[in-house]
Image (cartoon, helix red, strand yellow):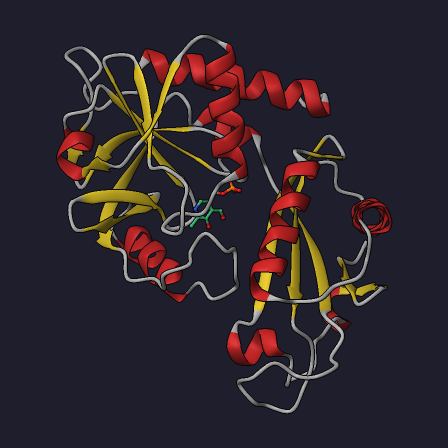
């Protein structure tokens, strides 16, 4: 079956799917996006993704008139047409096509693109046993990274640096403060407290982050939303990251410095393991997905 994409209301083979060269998404990164996990054919956390998408559109003043119901149907139609049970749904909405000019065009309808890519979520469960490494890089992104725009060059360069260093992720630093990863939110655990950078303008409010806070709080665990430093991360009992494509992964080393208490140094720790149980139980509850 050929891969199919959605472009402005039409589903067509990916190879034939295209946007106009004067789409503002291409020329200015004047576009927002979402990545959703589809597991067992169901979209995880669809409601929160829609809320974030609409907030981002509103922040940028991109007008897009399709209501949630019909849009959800279009997304599900694309997923069904591709025939994948486990995949990532990519949604991108730009300010549309117009003669190149920085200021907003008067009347350009938004461009909407969706693609679907098969994804092995089982690998994320398998990685719970070993954990992953992160490096650190200065955060040189623009000042509104809470808006999920396609302007991701800072994130791209940081991720590439991680890849070249043999690490899974790059944690982005503002001075000594760890903000988040290039495509994930960053967490540490100290004395049983689960710590992550607060939302605001300097991190993306991750859907997986939000979900984890809810699950941990409901399980009577203590979550602190506050900035933490690189020194705290190095000295943490445990560390981990979250995202749609990696719902929770233990971080066992930061810049070659192994994380963890005696007996767990450089290994996944018990709090992260407990959180992983909660996260994957929630996935199963919503989607019926099992390894
Ligand atoms: C910079 C950044 N932070 C955090 C995340 C995690 O967000 P979510 O949990 O919604 O996938 C992402 C996801 O792409 C991201 O790009």
Judged left or right of residue 52, residue 254 is left
- x 62%, y 23%: residue: 283
The structure residue drawn at horizontal position 71% and vertical position 75%, both measured from the top left corner, is 18
Instruction: Give the residue drawn at x 73%, y 30%.
Output: 40
Residue 171, placed above or below residue 23: above
Marks counted in the figure total 0
Question: Where residue 179 sits in the image (x, y, percent)?
Answer: 30, 44
Q: Residue at x 61, y 41 (%)?
A: 119
The x, y position of residue 130, in whole percent, is 34, 25
Q: Quadrant of the C terminus?
A: top right
**Residue 163 in the figure: left or right of residue 125:** left
Task: Tell me if I can see residue 291 in this picture.
Answer: no
Question: Whole-percent x and y of residue 265?
Answer: 18, 19
Q: Measured along the vertical axis of the image, is residue 122 above or below residue 256?
A: above
**Residue 144 placement: quadrant:** bottom left
Residue 196: in sight, yes or no? yes
In this view, the residue in front, 203 or 78, is: 203
Vertical position of residue 106 compared to residue 134: above or below: below
């Amino acid at each position: 079956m050929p891969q199919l994409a959605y472009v402005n209301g039409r589903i067509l083979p990916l190879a034939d799917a295209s946007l106009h060269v004067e789409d503002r998404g291409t020329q200015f990164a004047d576009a927002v996006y979402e990545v959703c996990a589809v597991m067992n054919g169901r979209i995880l956390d669809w409601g929160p993704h829609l809320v974030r998408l609409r907030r981002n559109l509103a922040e940028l003043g991109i007008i897009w008139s399709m209501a949630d119901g019909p849009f959800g149907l279009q997304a599900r139609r694309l997923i069904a047409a591709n025939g994948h049970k486990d995949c990532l749904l990519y949604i991108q909405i730009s300010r549309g096509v117009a003669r190149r000019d920085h200021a907003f065009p008067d009347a350009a309808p938004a461009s909407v693109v969706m693609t679907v890519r098969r994804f092995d979520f089982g690998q994320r469960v398998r990685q719970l046993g070993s954990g992953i490494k992160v490096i650190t890089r200065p955060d040189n992104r623009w000042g509104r990274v809470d808006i999920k725009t396609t302007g991701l060059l800072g994130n791209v360069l940081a991720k590439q640096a991680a890849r070249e260093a043999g690490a899974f992720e790059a944690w982005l630093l503002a001075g000594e403060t760890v903000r988040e990863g290039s495509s994930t939110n960053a967490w540490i655990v100290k004395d049983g407290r689960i710590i992550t950078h607060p939302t605001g303008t300097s991190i993306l409010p991750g859907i997986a982050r939000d979900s984890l806070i809810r699950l941990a709080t409901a399980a009577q665990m203590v979550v602190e939303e506050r900035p933490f430093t690189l020194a705290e991360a190095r000295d943490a009992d445990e560390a981990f990251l979250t995202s749609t494509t990696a719902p929770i992964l233990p971080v066992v080393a930061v810049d070659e410095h192994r994380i963890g208490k005696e007996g767990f140094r450089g290994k996944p720790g018990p709090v992260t393991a407990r959180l992983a149980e909660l996260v994957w139980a929630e996935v199963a509850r919503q989607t019926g997905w099992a390894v």
